[in-house]
Amino acid sequence: MSILVIDKPSGPSSFAVCKRVRAILGEPRQKVGHGGTLDPFASGVLPICLGEATKVLPFLLDADKRYEATVRFGVETDTLDCTGQVVAEHPCGALAAETIESALVHFRGEIAQVPPMFSALKRGGRPLYAYARAGQVVDRPARKVSIHELSLVEFSAPERARLRVHCSKGTYIRQLAADLGRHLGVGAHLLELRRTASGPFEVGKSVTLEELRARVADGRPPPALSLLEALAHLPTVAVDEEQALVLERGQRMAWSAFGQGRGLVGPACAVVDGPAGPALVAIVTRGDDGNVRILRGFRRK
């Protein structure tokens, strides 16, 4: 059970990259899934889970993300990025790096962000982009997101800026770019986007599709993260072999007996079968009935 870190190129969808990985590995029936969608025009870190590892996908989506984003000021598009149609243009000749730096202050910390119309969020059972393509605009409640870091890396006067962003899950960088342009009074859209990290997955530990193909052809294993490394953001509880077997069989276990009564911090924790060479047994939480509730179970052998 392992997770590959692919450096997704600009162009294909995240789903298409999964299909390419499956083809490169020569396992057409292998279960494959990605840990966090990247828009087709975006590049960078795309975790790919293989086989049993796909069980951890829901727990990877909660991780913080890091990006490098290029913003084009003076031009607004309907999709808020470079793939859309231009809807407005504004002069931005007076824009300066100092002005942008001052504006960034307003977007750091916890902010309220309205999701863009061109997104997969659903309203009334339909994704928002379906309404947008039909020329309709629907109400979207603002959601709280956290911008841990937002800094200006480079400004190419008068219209382009490269930003570094560290943010919580659910943050739309193209909406951030559009909101920044609106705040500055010149409009903007997202020109380029590269994800440099997603939780423990970093671009420095990634491989391109071409590198993956070459490694497979040479018989070299690709760099991969274990499930425990991928779940490092969850608290870990070690259990003995007897308890591990109970959880493996899906049998009832009182929370008070679990992990020697250790309290749970957060909505879930990873259970391992011992401190020496631990194997992932399950991801669990505390059930309403006072028993251990198994969210995902894993085969250790």
Image: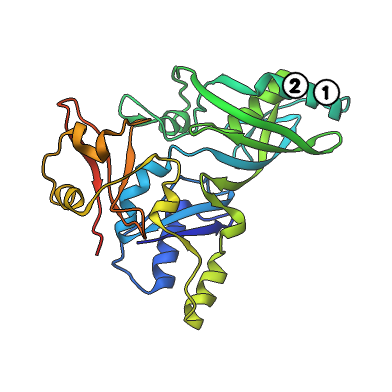
Kindly identify the residue that appears in the image at 38 percent across and 42 percent down: 59
- Which quadrant: the N terminus? bottom left
- Which quadrant: the C terminus? bottom left
Residue 30 x %, y %: 31, 65
Determine the secondary structure under disc 1.
Answer: helix
Would you say the residues marked 2 and 1 are in contact, meaning their CB atoms lie under 8 Å apart? Answer: yes
Viewer-proximal residue among 76 and 279: 279
So how many labels did they put on this image? Answer: 2
Gap between marks 2 and 1 measured at Cα? 6 Å
Viewer-proximal residue among 123 and 103: 103
Q: Is residue 99 above or below residue 233?
A: above
Q: Is residue 233 above or below residue 264?
A: below
Viewer-proximal residue among 290 and 122: 290
Residue 202 x %, y %: 57, 52
Residue type indicated by callout 2: Ala
Answer left or right for 280 relative to 39.
left
Q: Which mark is residue 103?
A: 2
Residue 95 visible at all: no
Residue 245 x %, y %: 16, 53
Residue 127 x %, y %: 38, 32
Which quadrant of the figure has residue 173? top right
User: Which residue matches tag 1?
Assistant: 99
Answer left or right for 217 relative to 237.
right
Instruction: Give the residue at the far front of this rendering.
Output: 260
